[in-house]
Amino acid sequence: MSHAQQTAEVPFADIESALAVRGDERSGADRSPRALTATVVAVGPGDRLEAAADPLRRLAESGGVRAISITHGSAAETHAHVSPSFVAIEGVPPPFVDNAVAAIRLSSLPTLVWWRGGPVEVLDRVVALADRVVLDVDDPDDLWAHVVTIFDRTAFSDLRWTRLTRWRALMAQFFDIPAVAAAATAFTRLRIEGADRPTARLFAGWLRTALAWQDSVTIDVADSRRDAPMESVTLSGGDIELRLCVAGSRRCVETTATVPGQAATSRVVSLGAQSLESLLAAELRIRSRDSAFEQAVRASANT
């Protein structure tokens, strides 16, 4: 069935009744009605939400969530496009975005807001309705500077942070080597190369706080001509060098540890699923505040 056949345009006030009808249609076809577990609400400008529509649909179809897309704008009358697993609302005036979220989220279940851009005053109002806010904007510097002032209002994360999960785990595993753990305060240089400077700065901020660095480590962030947000990380000091880099397959990370008195060790580890819906699904499994993320965002301002 085509997308046009599956979707109905309805007035905002009729969204819930339309969802009930569409849900019955899906249940009849699939013979397997699903219990919903959360609401995922993507909020942002039109161009950013157009790219989010398909990942949201796939997440809703596979993950048992109510998926909603709210494009802020200045429409005189707001209409919604409703399908069995997805609601797209376009042209909501910024002062009423929080009202739209409140009206159609499942208030008895967790609400994750996927913030893809917009005025911070809109975010401030939406935060009160969210159990978790996942940031995802092109240039996060001003947004990060703002959210550090409201960390106490809900749990925050960022898709850049989610993409760094495997990188952080692999770096932490180096410190299972006794000689590396003993040298934790002796490192003098961190070099990160990648196509996305904020991602590199976030990783550097995390490592700075995890190892309680002061000003003894030189941090060098270099732009990469390749497309990976993170291309390589090299942490060195004395005769120890720890290195992570994207492998030739572009789907894995190669880890190398050079430690005095030991043979150099190397292995290749999968980066894991990096699609938008996979990253959001990972964030849905987290309920509490992430203090490591909060500290990394604060430290990234000085990187």
Image (cartoon, helix red, strand yellow):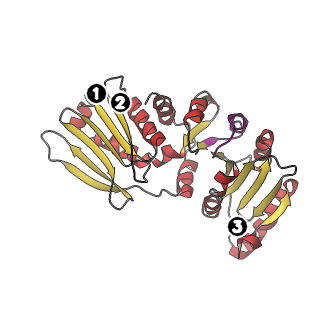
Residue under label 2: 211
Give percent across and percent down for residue 250.
38, 59
Q: If the image is split into quadrants, where does the C terminus sit? A: top left
2 and 1 marks in contact (CB < 8 Å): yes
Q: Amino acid at mark 1?
A: Thr
Q: Earlier in the sequence, mark 3 or mark 1?
A: 3
Residue under label 3: 33
Q: Amino acid at mark 2?
A: Leu
Q: Residue at x 71, y 60 (%)?
A: 86
Label 2 to label 1: alpha-carbon separation: 7 Å
Q: Which residues are magenta?
A: 117-133
Where is residue 60, by image quadrant?
Answer: bottom right
3 and 1 marks in contact (CB < 8 Å): no
75 over 131 or under it: above or below: below
Label 3 to label 1: alpha-carbon separation: 55 Å
Quick check: can you spot residue 131? yes
Residue under label 1: 185
Q: Residue furthest left?
A: 261
Q: Residue at x 65, y 62 (%)?
A: 57
